[in-house]
Amino acid sequence: MSRPESGQVTVMIVGFFVVAGLVVAMAVNASAAYLGQRRLADLADGAALAASEGVTRSSLYAAGDRTIALDAAAARTAAEDYLRESGAGATVRGLTWQVDESGDAVRVRLRAGVRMPLVPPGWGETARVEADAVVELRVR
């Protein structure tokens, strides 16, 4: 007794389009996450450079061939001012930052959420991304 095979190709075609749609969604969302992380990395670099303005002037002129101590409070204030004035808080979803110093270096760490453009059922609407930058001043 022979079974009818009508409809078999239709199931395969539907399955193919579902898989293709998921692959496209993953590629588009991965691109969005990458671009969001690059935006954060740019902001972190700018904040770290702004923090380098927190150099202690007396140590700059007496440096010789060594690293220069940063004024921790001035470096933190400069980095935070940069992030506020850049408008990053309004353009980057859920932006948080942390500025840490350790003697002659300042680290700026940013975290934010990136909205995913294509959200299949069961997937999260945002992805968390992070970026950090470190500035250390050396005189040669």
Image (cartoon, rainbow, N blue to C red):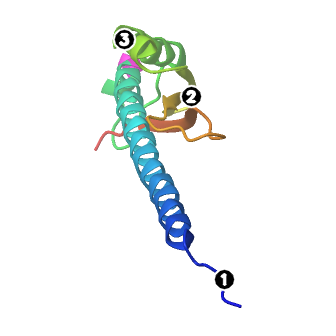
Q: Verify CB contact (< 8 Å) between mark 2 and mark 3.
A: no
Considering the whole magenta stretch, tell me its main secondary structure. helix
**Highlighted magenta segment, given as a residue range:** 54-58
Q: Name the residue under label 3.
A: 87
Q: Verify CB contact (< 8 Å) between mark 3 and mark 1.
A: no
Left or right side of 93 for 123: right
Q: Quadrant of residue 29?
A: top left
Q: How far apart are marks 1 and 2 (CA)?
A: 74 Å
Q: Is residue 18 above or below residue 16?
A: above
Q: How far apart are marks 2 and 3 (CA)?
A: 24 Å
Q: Is residue 18 above or below residue 50?
A: below
The front one of 16 and 78 is 16
Left or right side of 100 for 28: left
Left or right side of 137 for 122: right
* Mark 3 element type: loop
Q: Mark 1 points at which residue?
A: 3
* Mark 1 element type: loop
Tag 3: amino acid:
Gly
Q: In which quarter of the image is residue 53?
A: top left
Q: Verify CB contact (< 8 Å) between mark 1 and mark 2.
A: no
Quadrant where the N terminus is found in the figure: bottom right
Spot occupied by residue 127 in the image (x, y as percentages of width and height): 56, 36
Q: Please say whether residue 24 is visible from this viewpoint.
A: yes
Q: Name the residue under label 2.
A: 101
Q: Distance between the residues labelled 3 and 1?
A: 66 Å
Task: Pick out the residue farthest to the front.
Answer: 1
Which residue occupies 34% across, 14% down?
86
The front one of 51 and 69 is 51
Q: Earlier in the sequence, mark 3 or mark 1?
A: 1
